[in-house]
Amino acid sequence: MNRRAQDALDAYTTPIIRAIKTIAVEQVFVSFSPQPSDSKVRVAEISSPQRRPLKLRTSERSTRLWLRFRVSLLIVEQADAPDTVGIELDSYSFQLFRGDGQARFDEIVTYHWTPNDLAAKRSWPHLHIGSAFIDPAARREPWALHKTHFLTGPITAAGFVRMAVEEFGVEPLTADWEQRLAAEPSTAP
Amino acid sequence: MRAHNPSPETDGELPDETGFEPDVIYLSPDEWMVLFERDVRDAFGVSAAEFVRRYRAGEYDDSDPDVMLLSVSITMYDAILAA
């Protein structure tokens, strides 16, 4: 990958990594598909390590929260300018869990968008409420509410992190977290 | 796996409980594939190829958190196989 391509990719990946690292100590995984001989497109993926959620610190010590995320990007060589590339969002999933860190992880919310996925039931960005927080005995809410796709706009990693901090009491690891998140570009993800 | 820290000036700011850790681990395609296979098998008890087939056939509940996470990786899976 040439320098311009790397710079273009960094402009997308660095904000994601910096936002996640605002609340998560552990490493982030980054991977690239091989350069295909018959295609101008490569794939980049940024994720939390495997399926294992990342532990988050919370202001309430009794509350244990966890994060998983995965973002897929397309690196597209421009046909008329081989030295330049475009970076396009392929899909994302940002997930917040509550759990004991061992056997139990209850999904609180997932922000999900797979615009290029022909098998996806919804092509627009949406969120799912975690099923563990829907009471089957409740009189008003259907117990299948977690299957509902609630429309959202495109979500950024910085926006997701801000939500986790401000709504769920996740403790940022740096004092300047607000400036860090505010400095991130608003382009998805 | 290659470790890299794209912003070394921030390390000292992190109240790291586990000691120094780099921000980023770069996975080769082979390493990525091994981990994806493991993730899929842990979550669904099938191979990655079978997971992709079942996903595309609409056989999974798309509100399952593992489906929502691992389906993001299908593009990478396809790209690695095609290379």
Image (cartoon, coloured by chain):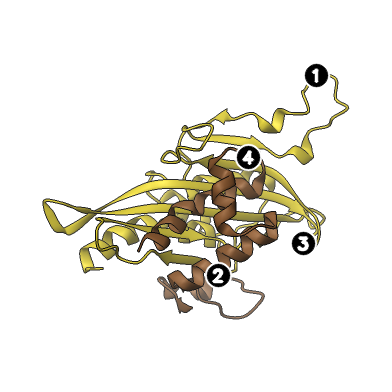
Q: Colour of chain B?
A: brown
Per the image, the residue denoted by label 1 is A140
Q: Colour of chain A?
A: yellow
Per the image, the residue denoted by label 4 is B59
Answer yes or no: are tags 2 and 4 on the same subunit.
Answer: yes
* Crowd around label 2: few <14 · some 14–19 · many ≥20 (10 Å): few
Work out how far the residue at label 2 is from the one at label 3, CA to CA, in angstroms: 24 Å
Work out how far the residue at label 1 is from the one at label 2, CA to CA, in angstroms: 45 Å
B19, above or below A143, in the image: below
Helix, strand or loop under label 1: loop
Q: Amino acid at mark 3?
A: Gly
Instruction: Give the residue displayed 61% in from the left and 55% down from the top.
Output: A68
x and y, in percent, of residue A152 in the image: 51, 32
Foreground of the two, A68 or A90: A90
Helix, strand or loop under label 2: helix
The answer to whether the residue labelled 2 contacts the one labelled 4, judged by CB atoms less than 8 Å apart, is no
Q: Amino acid at mark 2?
A: Val
Q: Amino acid at mark 4?
A: Glu
Per the image, the residue denoted by label 2 is B34
Foreground of the two, B64 or A135: B64
Foreground of the two, A87 or A58: A87
Q: Choose mark 4 or mark 3, whichever is in front.
A: 4
x and y, in percent, of residue A11 in the image: 33, 57
Helix, strand or loop under label 3: loop
Q: Amino acid at mark 1?
A: Arg
Answer yes or no: are tags 4 and 3 on the same subunit.
Answer: no
x and y, in percent, of residue A185 in the image: 37, 48
The answer to whether the residue labelled 1 contacts the one labelled 2, judged by CB atoms less than 8 Å apart, is no
Q: Please give the label number shown on residue A101.
A: 3
Can residue A56 be seen at all in this image of the molecule?
no
